[in-house]
Image (spheres, rainbow, N blue to C red):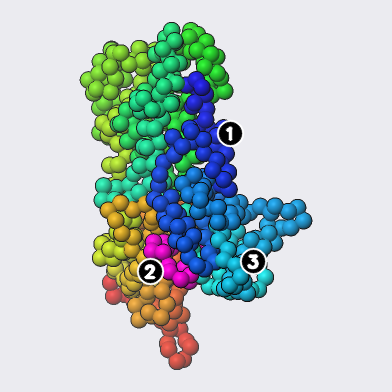
């Protein structure tokens, strides 16, 4: 195969992207591209244990659509062919193999050996692996016929359909085992931050100039016969992507996009990402011969800049959800005062190339260097900022709020409760400030009384207590299995009979951090973070019928204060003016 044909195998639409989880469907190229992950090792252990167990054994491989369950099972066939001969595999539990049956009816038959009547039968010891989406399992357990109480109990006790990390130890003397792919992430957490070794490994497998790399062999063969390799964006992008600084930059973009936009990313999507970074959209449907003719044309030479990786990375929102997220992280869109002087100098430079050379981000032999004179000022500034990011002159990892969120995620998943106290304080401050400052003291909170009020504030006292609860601690220096949101718990003082739980993702954490810096949430913020608004209102309204309300009236420099007080036992309210300021 040619270089372009090798790259085409990385596309989601390629036939190589199709994997049959019910047999070993790995060919030589798929085997070369395979990246071993912790989830693979954990499933191997489960299969080995279940195979040696004298009991009937059901292994549930849980996850969401498109997260790589089929790929994982195909890899198991390649790694454990003899063991899997003793298992029944159901790879797509959302489909019925019979036209006259629903998928739930089909599932009932697949699960039949594990119903309450059959599961302890001495006549047979069935071994089954079922790859099933979490929603499908939930539907089955809700609608299945009676007789699956043991299975339901196992799912409930192990919180399989809830967001909770399962213990990694394999249970003994049980019929049921489960591996949840939603526990495993394409990136990892450590003291150094968050990164995706999977993405880096894939890029290196594709771009590394080593003898056993079929992509690099094809690259050398294709461009050895090319009259002008430097005129081809594929040549340029492929070599640029082999740069370790560029790999680090793409890595940080991906991780931040996943955390910020909650992207569900499979290994196959990462391969498609690498393809899109190397092959410009305009050339994706062309053969090597067609590309050669295209890139040597005068018109394409003048457009070379827009087909290079720095531009593709931040101007390809229509290509995929990943690139749509990348666009929002474009360093050229930042309002950074430290860059103003650089932008001014670059805009007025008589020889822009010298400025790029000064910062070490372009050399005279770089194909982009020759295009600088033809670029407009805006494009020149954008290229400078993007290359500066790509080569780590500055990078997104300096985002303090993002880094704090990752650090709290690490502590939360490790069970380091003491380290979460500043987080509780941050969120508590945001709760009290969500409806604006009361001007009454730290323990007062404003009620949301509708549209923004400039004249009246209605407040009540509210003293919160922090009630942290633990998770199953995940051990290790680097975490691949972890909760990707933070769950906090509060109580109202003297009313500890009820707990109020709050789940915090990055976007809510970011808003909480801004509120702590003085930012005042507006109506758009409250509509976006509707769950947090509801949480705050539930706290305010809890046992509110017995609480005193303070009403403040603002008229220019004049402020009046009133109190509405409930009299216990008489079911009456008293409205008084309080001039004690």
Q: Which residue corresponds to mark 3?
A: 112
Q: Is residue 186 left or right of residue 429?
A: right
Q: Which of the 4 image quarters holds residue 232?
A: top left
Q: Do the residues labelled 2 and 3 touch (CB within 8 Å)?
A: no
Dot 2 falls on a residue whose secondary structure is strand
Badge 1, how many Cα within 10 Å: few under 14, some, many 20+? few
Question: Which marked residue is nearer to the observer: mark 3 or mark 1?
Answer: 3
Q: Distance between the residues labelled 2 and 3?
A: 40 Å
Residue drawn 42% across the image and 87% down it = 567
Q: Going by the image, does 110 lie left or right of 344?
A: right
Can the viewer see residue 21 in this picture? yes
Which residue is at the front of the view, 296 or 176?
176
The x, y position of residue 523, in whole percent, is: 47, 54
C-alpha separation, residue under disc 2 versus residue under disc 1 = 48 Å
The residue that appears at 36% across and 37% down in the rendered structure is 200
Q: Position of residue 458 (x, y in %)?
A: 41, 69
Residues at badges 3 and 1 in contact (C-beta under 8 Å)? no
Could you tell which of marks 2 and 3 lies nearer the N-terminus? 3
Q: Where is residue 579 in the image (x, y as percent from the top left)?
A: 31, 75
Furthest toward the right, the residue is 100
Region in magenta:
156-175
Give the image quarter of residue 143: bottom right
Question: Can you tell which quarter of the image residue 336 is in?
Answer: top left
State which tag comes first along the sequence, 2 or 1.
Answer: 1
Q: Which is more toward the observer, 330 or 431?
A: 330
Q: Mark 1 points at which residue?
A: 15
Q: Nearer the viewer, residue 529 or 497?
A: 497
Q: Nearer the viewer, residue 493 or 101?
A: 101
Question: Residue at (35%, 42%) from the top-left corner?
Answer: 197
On the image, numbered disc 2 is attached to which residue? 489
């Amino acid at each position: 195969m040619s270089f372009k044909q090798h790259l085409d195998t990385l596309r989601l639409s390629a036939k190589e992207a199709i994997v049959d989880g019910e047999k070993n469907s790995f060919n030589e190229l798929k085997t070369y591209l395979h990246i071993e992950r912790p989830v693979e090792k954990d499933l191997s252990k489960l299969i080995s244990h279940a195979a040696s167990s004298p009991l009937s054994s059901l292994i549930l491989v849980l996850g969401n659509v498109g997260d790589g369950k089929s790929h994982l099972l195909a890899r198991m066939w390649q790694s454990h062919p003899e063991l899997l001969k003793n298992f029944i595999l159901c790879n797509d539990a959302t489909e019925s193999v019979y036209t006259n049956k629903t998928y739930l009816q089909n599932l009932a038959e697949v699960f039949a050996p594990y119903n309450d009547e059959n599961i302890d039968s001495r006549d047979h010891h069935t071994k089954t692996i079922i790859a099933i989406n979490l929603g499908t399992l939930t539907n089955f357990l809700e609608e299945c016929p009676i007789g699956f109480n043991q299975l339901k109990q196992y799912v409930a006790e192990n919180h399989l359909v809830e967001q909770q990390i399962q213990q990694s130890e394999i249970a003994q003397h049980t019929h049921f085992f489960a591996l949840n792919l939603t526990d495993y992430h394409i990136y990892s957490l450590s003291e150094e931050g968050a990164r995706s070794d999977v993405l880096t490994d894939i890029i290196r497998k594709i771009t590394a100039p080593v003898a056993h790399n079929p992509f690099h062999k094809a690259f050398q063969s294709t461009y050895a016969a090319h009259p002008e390799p430097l005129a081809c964006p594929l040549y340029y992008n492929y070599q640029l992507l082999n740069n370790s600084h560029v790999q680090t930059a793409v890595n940080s973009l991906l991780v931040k996009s996943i955390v910020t936009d909650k992207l569900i990313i499979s290994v196959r999507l990462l391969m498609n990402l690498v393809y899109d970074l190397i092959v410009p959209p305009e050339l994706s449907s062309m053969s090597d011969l067609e590309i050669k003719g295209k890139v040597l044309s005068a018109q394409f030479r003048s457009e070379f800049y827009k087909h290079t990786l720095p531009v593709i990375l931040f101007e390809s929102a229509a290509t995929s959800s990943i690139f749509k997220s990348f666009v929002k992280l474009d360093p050229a869109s930042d309002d950074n005062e430290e860059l103003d002087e650089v932008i001014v100098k670059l805009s007025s430079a008589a020889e822009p190339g010298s400025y790029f050379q000064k910062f070490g981000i372009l050399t005279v032999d770089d194909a982009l260097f020759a295009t600088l004179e033809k670029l407009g000022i805006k494009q020149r500034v954008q290229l400078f900022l993007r290359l500066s990011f790509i080569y780590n002159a500055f990078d997104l990892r300096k985002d303090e709020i993002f880094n704090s969120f990752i650090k709290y995620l690490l502590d939360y998943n490790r069970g380091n409760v003491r380290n979460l106290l500043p987080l509780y304080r941050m969120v508590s401050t945001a709760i009290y400030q969500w409806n604006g400052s009361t001007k009454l003291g730290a323990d007062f909170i404003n009620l949301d009384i509708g549209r923004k009020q400039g004249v009246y504030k209605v407040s009540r006292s509210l003293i919160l207590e922090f009630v942290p609860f633990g998770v199953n601690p995940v051990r290790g220096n680097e975490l691949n299995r972890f909760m990707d949101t933070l769950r906090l718990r509060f109580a109202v003082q003297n009313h500890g009979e009820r707990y109020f739980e709050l789940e915090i993702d990055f976007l809510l954490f970011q808003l909480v951090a801004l509120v702590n810096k003085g930012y005042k949430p507006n109506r758009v913020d409250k509509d976006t973070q509707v769950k947090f608004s509801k949480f705050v209102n539930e706290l305010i309204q809890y046992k509110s019928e017995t609480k005193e309300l303070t009403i403040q009236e603002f008229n220019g420099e004049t402020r009046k204060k009133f109190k509405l007080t409930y009299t216990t036992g008489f079911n009456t309210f008293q409205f008084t003016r309080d001039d004690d300021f």
